[in-house]
Every structure is written in structure tokens, then in C-alpha cells.
Amino acid sequence: MPSGARLLSIQLQDGLPQMWTACDPGAAKVLRRTAAFGTGDDMALTANARYIGTLQVGYAVLHYFDLGERLR
């Protein structure tokens, strides 16, 4: 993903999870870490993370967080 990308949202599109971002396609590429937690899961990793959104797929409810970027 381009460095400095801002994760905007995660939603279902045609039944599949999709993540939308605001980014500069010409920026250097980095690895971006995200995490999904089910309702009731231990979310200790999210202390410094930014909430992206929640997906409800059938009985599953998953909460997504941006854990930041790191160099490739």
C-alpha cells in the first residue's frame, strides 16, 4: 500500500470485504498491518490502533483496526 495512506472504511461489496483508502499512488510502498477481532475477543493489540469499521457477515461480527505501516 502507498506510504501515508489513510484507511477510510471497510464494508461488504458484492458479499466480499473491501477496504477503501485515500492515498497517493506514487508514494513509496509499505506493508500495512490491520487486525480483525470478533465481538468479545481480547483486543489488547488495539491500544494504539485506529478503528476502521465493523463488518457483520452472517453471525460473525468483526471489528477492524489499523495497526500502522512498516517498511517492506
Image (spheres, rainbow, N blue to C red):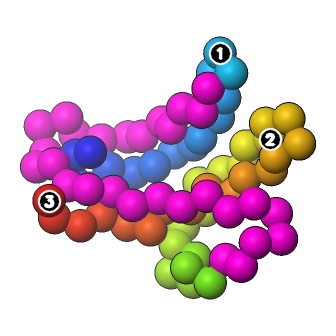
On residue 57, which mark appears? Answer: none
- Residue 16 x/y as whole percent: 61, 26
Tag 2 or tag 3, which sits nearer the N-term? 2
- Magenta stretch containing residue 5, yes or no? no
Q: Residue at 12%, 37% (x, y): give it.
A: 26
Q: Quadrant of residue 33?
A: bottom left
The three-letter amino acid code for the residue at tag 1 is Asp
Q: Residue at 83%, 71% (x, y): give it.
A: 40
Q: Residues within 10 Å of mark 2 (few under 14, many from 20)?
A: few
Residue placed furthest toward the top: 14
Q: Residues within 10 Å of mark 1 (few under 14, many from 20)?
A: few
Q: Which residue is mark 1?
A: 14
The three-letter amino acid code for the residue at tag 2 is Gln
Q: Residues within 10 Å of mark 3 (few under 14, many from 20)?
A: few
Compared with 65, 61 (above or below) is above
Q: Secondary structure at mark 2?
A: strand
Q: Which residue is mark 3?
A: 72
Q: Residue at 67%, 77% (x, y): give it.
A: 43
Q: Which residues are drawn in magenta?
A: 16-43
Position of the C terminus by quadrant: bottom left
The three-letter amino acid code for the residue at tag 3 is Arg
Residue placed furthest toward the right: 59
